[in-house]
Amino acid sequence: MKRQPFRLPAETAGPFLGAAIDRSKPIRFRLDGRSIEGFTGDTVLSAALAAGIDTLGTIHGAPLALSYAVAPAVQLAGSTIPLPMERTPATDGAEYFTGARNSLLHRLLGGNSLHLDQHPSSATVSGEHLQRQYGRADLVVVGAGIAGLTAALAAARSGLSVMVLEARLQPGGYSVLFGRQEGEDQPETAIATLLAAVAANDAITLVTSAEVVSARSGLVQAHVVHLVGGKPQAQLLEIESPRIILATGSLERLPIFAGNRLPRARGALEAFELGWHYGIWPGRDAVIATVSSVAYRLAMLAADARVRINRVIDTRAGPESRFIAFSRAYGITQAPGSRLAAAVQSRGRLQLRTESAMGGAATGGADLTTDSLVACGGWQPDLTLWNGAGGFSRWQSSRHRLEATGTLDGIALAGSAAGWLSRTACAASGPDAVAALLGRPRQGVQELSIDPVYDTPDDPTSIASVAGEASFLAAGRHLFRRPAAAPGSWPWQRQPATESIADTPQPLDVGIVAASVQLGLVPAASAGAVAQERTGLALAHTRPAEAPPPRAPTLLPDYLVGRFGGRGQLWLIRPTEGRTLDPGGLIQPDADTADPLAAIGVVVRPVQDGALALLDGAAIGSAGSKVMLRESTRVVPLTLVAPYAEGMDLAAALSRGAGTP
């Protein structure tokens, strides 16, 4: 395993043998000129991580972990189509490029970094030549976890044609990590039974490696990667459907401390996925920091894979659960009432500093040294697509998270995205969502809960007492750092009011909004509105004229109507360099303007090779004029291509260039 230092040995991997890979079928490919070894079943990302490449590059001078959320698009040699590194199957003999500059120097340097010292471009939005496939279904289910699979089966039994879209290559969700409660089957058995029933049902089509980028009433769009003739290819899948179920699961919150996105630091879900599916664990020992009992389950699985768990740091005082009791039997050292204060890299290992989590005290704790760190900050329902479809949410202080409220025409939530916690409730919520969409009597969903005396509830996401460099608010694609206190101020002096994160120029995600509520950057009463406006804007729909007309979604969300005092205009814009424009990014008139309140526009939806933006008509020039998009690390020049007109071919307008209607 010298060429795969982070791949656990087969003879000791136990539960982390790697269910998705075939260790009897080794493969080799090249990435930016470097030879990478892996196995059939690996993705380009998993093979790179197994090979010890755990660093994307640097941001603000600090190393940034290569992860599912922040991974660059790759291109096959001879192709210009970007492919998502985390969803692209690794193929023997292939040559992939990330677009990194000075590839010869990088090849000579080697090491554990891709040397991409900027935010990576996304492969989610299609390029000019991306193939499109169209279809129809009576019901589209987004997510192939327990809730999504039970929803698909219930719909098929009702005579509906069903398409299930799953972003990961492996369906089934994360039930194995969360274990089972009394009266439930083993999660592996439950998932296998559901998948077998789905495979045997001709009314259900399951598509994996399909990341849904837009789910609007009547239409779902997904970016899909699949193998054609042994080579990975991407396409945009557009499905018309009168009914949509969002079973998108939960996002894992990121504990907030300096160094929380360093290489070898990751969340419990990602650590489990890399171990369970690909047999990957960086190093031979680990520290786990958590606010949730689920992390103890991961600690035991890792221990069974011969990973030494140095300590489990828990913010809760005297926590109890079945997982905690079992982990004591494993001999795992537990440190309740503590949280992480900072992490730094030192000679290939992580140096951790802890502090007391009790009563807000900031008493310095012991230093720990470890190969890897798992930091679990609790769970936030993934409401990204719900927000994009126009759905509302509200901050629930008792659960420290945003939860969906209200209803949408033709769209329903299921599983943990709908707020359910237990596997029993998630399984029941799938058929319940189908009944709601069909207008049939609903059986309701009963949560299977354990008395808090025996199962301590999760704490809020832990936040270090002092802000430090490279302290990020969430583990997603958008790299938003925790605001620091004003320099030179004394502890007893009143700090100046922090700028509202709702006005920040860079895009947000649901995790950032949730963290901002805890930090006081967003009022709890406003969190739902901020989340809807800044995290849920969807991919613009484009379609060639010969395709059958869909049920077209509204281009401008209701909450943007009336912006700029009635002067708002929809424009097609194009960056002067090839890159993706993220929804929610604020547009400024020039490179020197940074005040969010002075913004003259906002990116509404990405379009291939550009974006649709809402601009202040009184503050912009004509087609061909330049405006600027500010990101956290740089300014991106944009060209005004053409004002939007109903029915226009967006792709054709962008390809013709500025000034062409």
Image (spheres, grey):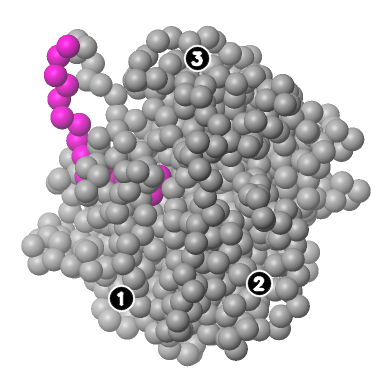
Q: Mark 3 or mark 1, which has the lower sequence index?
A: 3
Residue 56 in which image quadrant? top right
**Residue 229: x %, y % from top left:** 78, 69
Quarter of the image that includes the N terminus: top right
Extent of the magenta region: 492-512
Q: Are marks 2 and 1 in contact (CB under 8 Å)?
A: no
Q: Are marks 2 and 3 in contact (CB under 8 Å)?
A: no
Nearest the eye: 308 or 651: 308
Mark 1: secondary structure? loop
Tell me the amino acid under the disc marked 1.
Thr
Residue shown at 65% from the left, 79% from the top: 204
Mark sitting on residue 271: none
Tell me the amino acid under the disc marked 2.
Leu
Mark 3: secondary structure? strand
User: Label 3 belongs to which residue?
Assistant: 353
Residue shown at 34% from the left, 30% from the top: 482
User: Label 1 belongs to which residue?
Assistant: 554
Apparent side of residue 240 relative to residue 388 in the rendered image (left or right): right
Q: CA distance from mark 2 to mark 3?
A: 45 Å
**Residue 413: x %, y % from top left:** 45, 66
For the image shown, how many numbered marks are present on the structure? 3
Q: Can residue 57 be seen in the rendering of this structure?
A: no
Q: Mark 2 or mark 1, which has the lower sequence index?
A: 2
Nearest the eye: 291 or 138: 291
